[in-house]
Image: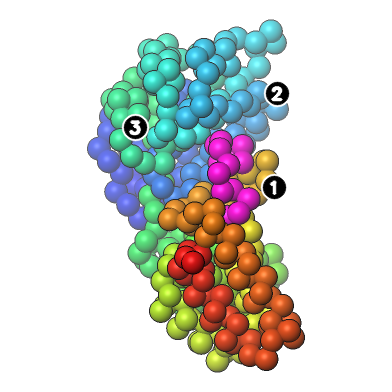
């Protein structure tokens, strides 16, 4: 029976629809939807299950957006020692015509002892391939990684994180975590991991408050997210709330710098999320997030934002008389995407 996806009903299909945390290997595993963290976890789970079954697993990666004709067939061809193979294909939503043609042909006769994972983040490109897989060609399964927009979905996610770790969390603790991390599922997951690592026993609202209520880094990232998205009023409001709660301007600037620095690294970079993550020492979800943040920015605007960050950093560390004004000026530049 088809499993229900996390918080979102999966589209009708003839193949099993699995949630990201219950995925099992199949000749073809289609991972769809925009939620990068859930997709990354599902793909990692497939790899771990296959490697646990046979440590000799051979893992290969393909960028469907820069596909070389014959690549899939070459990687799927039997090897000398007949090791099982995992072929991970990223950016299917940007696939070339050659990949689309060869992937459709592959579905008619999947290779033995081979699992092909296809990551499609959304859009109409590659729809013919997705329709063929969903119709049952190739013996595949689909993992739907929909964005968790509702608080109830994110609460379910947090509950599952603690349940998997065999730890109890009170409803108040779950609400407090979801409220503290509203913009980034990866940061919410990291907060759960920190609580699991640093605490014993039940996780209560008091425990969450001790770690995150008024915590500078949490508030700072919320301010940075709002400013980078161009929401000036919201960013300034969050800034004032953070400062009133005791946040220090220095780590506030550091949070902005971390995000803008990642954006600068990836500006103009080409390749799959996995390739760029390896190249720049990041996680794939960080690459995906930075790419979303870069929408609407120009190279000139990014340069002005970096200059504004450097100025604000100096002023909040003693070079200026009014660190709050320095923060507000910096937010203005970044929220305008560095407009002159």
From the viewer's perspective, is 145 left or right of 279? Answer: left
Relative image position of residue 335 (x, y in whole percent): 47, 69
The furthest residue to the left: 12
- Answer with mark 3 or mark 1, whichever residue precedes in sequence: 3
From the viewer's perspective, is 104 left or right of 223? Answer: left
Q: Is residue 134 magenta?
A: no
Instruction: From this view, report whether residue 46 is shown above or below residue 252.
Output: above
Instruction: From this view, report whether residue 115 is shown above or below residue 91.
Output: above
- Answer with mark 2 or mark 3, whichever residue precedes in sequence: 2
Give the magenta-colored segment's residue range.
Answer: 263-276
Per the rendering, the mark at residue 281 is: 1
The secondary structure type at the circle numbered 2 is loop
The secondary structure type at the circle numbered 1 is loop
Q: Residue at x 67, y 41 (%)?
A: 278
Q: Could you say which is closer to the camera, residue 309 or residue 289?
A: 309
Q: In this rendering, does residue 192 appear at all?
A: no
Residue to which mark 2 is pinned = 56
Mark 2 Cα shell of 10 Å, populated few (<14), some (14-19), many (≥20): some
Instruction: From this view, report whether residue 153 is shown above or below residue 220.
Output: above
* Inter-mark Cα distance, 2 to 1: 26 Å
- Answer with mark 2 or mark 1, whichever residue precedes in sequence: 2
Relative image position of residue 55 (x, y in whole percent): 70, 27
Q: Residue at x 68, y 46 (%)?
A: 280
Relative image position of residue 92 (x, y in whole percent): 43, 32
Residue to which mark 3 is pinned = 125
Q: Is residue 268 magenta?
A: yes
Q: In this rendering, does residue 314 appear at all?
A: yes
């Amino acid at each position: 029976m088809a499993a229900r996806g996390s918080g979102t009903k999966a589209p009708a299909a003839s193949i099993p629809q699995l949630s990201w945390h219950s995925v099992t290997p199949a000749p073809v595993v289609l991972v769809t939807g925009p939620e990068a963290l859930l997709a990354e976890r599902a793909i990692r789970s497939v790899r771990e299950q296959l490697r646990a079954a046979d440590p000799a697993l051979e893992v290969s990666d393909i960028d469907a957006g820069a596909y070389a004709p014959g690549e899939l067939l070459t990687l799927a061809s039997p090897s000398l020692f007949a090791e099982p193979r995992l072929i991970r294909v990223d950016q299917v939503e940007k696939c070339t015509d050659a990949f689309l043609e060869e992937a459709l042909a592959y579905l008619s006769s999947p290779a033995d002892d081979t699992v092909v994972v296809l990551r499609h983040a959304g859009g109409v490109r590659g729809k013919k391939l997705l329709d063929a897989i969903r119709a049952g060609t190739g013996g595949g399964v689909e993992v739907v990684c929909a964005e968790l927009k509702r608080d109830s979905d994110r609460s379910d996610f947090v509950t599952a994180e603690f349940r998997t770790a065999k730890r109890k969390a009170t409803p108040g603790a779950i609400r407090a975590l979801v409220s503290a991390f509203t913009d980034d599922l990866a940061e919410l997951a990291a907060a759960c991991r920190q609580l699991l690592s640093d605490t014993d026993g039940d996780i209560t609202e008091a425990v969450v408050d001790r770690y995150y209520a008024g915590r500078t880094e949490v508030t700072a990232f919320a301010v940075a997210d709002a400013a980078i998205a161009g929401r000036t009023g919201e960013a300034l409001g969050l800034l004032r709330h953070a400062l009133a709660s005791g946040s220090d301007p220095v780590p506030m600037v550091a949070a902005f710098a971390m995000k803008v620095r990642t954006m600068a690294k990836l500006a103009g970079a080409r390749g799959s999320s996995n390739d760029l993550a390896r190249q720049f020492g990041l996680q794939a979800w960080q690459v995906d997030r930075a790419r979303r943040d870069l929408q609407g920015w120009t190279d000139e605007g990014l340069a002005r934002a970096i200059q504004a960050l450097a100025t604000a950093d100096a002023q909040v560390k003693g070079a200026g008389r009014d660190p709050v004004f320095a923060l507000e000026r910096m937010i203005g530049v970044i929220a305008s995407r560095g407009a002159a």
